[in-house]
Amino acid sequence: PGATNQDIINALRFTASQSISPDNVLGYGIASFYKAYTLLKKQQNNTGSNKPVYMISANPFPERLELIITSPSPSGWMVDVYTVQGKLVERYANIASNRPLLIGSKIKSGIYILRIISGSQIAIEKIIKN
């Protein structure tokens, strides 16, 4: 895809095995070139689309889920987490693009709906906490 060097580095870091908690021994961990390519391809295909481009870490997740919004809109994203019954359990406002957001550390195990919004751009994703 037509990505910059920094876009490729960010995609590799985000999709690596230890992206949520890099350390001094393994750093970001093992890179997933396929996941990074898929993320960059998704960004390229959604250019001009009305859907936000984002990537989430492992789903289902044990403790917390990492979300990064990579759409061109630089800021003003809102992220909501709902139960399957429609009850709002977490809300994050004014989220900037290309910055990791950790979600779900305060919620119980179960199935949730993740909603990402900025203006007219909306995406919905099912997430599962173990």
Image (tube, helix red, strand yellow):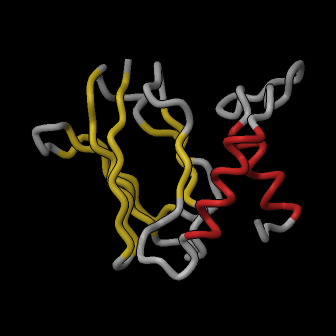
Q: Is residue 39 left or right of residue 11?
A: left
Residue depicted at x 46% and y 19%? 62
Determine the residue located farthest toward the bottom in the rendered image: 48
- On screen, residue 117 above or below 99: below
Give how far across and how far down residue 55 sits, in percent: 56, 49
The image position of residue 45, as x and y in percent, is 58, 69
Q: Is residue 44 left or right of residue 61?
A: right
Residue 61's spot in the image, x, y percent?
46, 25
Quarter holding residue 73:
bottom right
| Residue 10 x, y percent position in the rendering | 77, 52
Q: How many marks?
A: 0
- Which residue is rendered at x = 88% and y = 62% of the image? 5
Q: Quick check: 53 above or below 111?
A: below
Q: Quadrant of the N terminus?
A: bottom right
Residue found at x 23% / y 43%: 82
Residue closest to the eye, 23 or 60: 60
Seen at 45% across and 39% down, the residue is 103
Q: Quadrant of the C terminus?
A: top left
Q: Nearer the viewer, residue 75 or 85?
A: 85
Residue 113 sits in which quadrant?
top left
When the figure is inspected, residue 3 is found, relative to residue 73, above or below; the finding is above
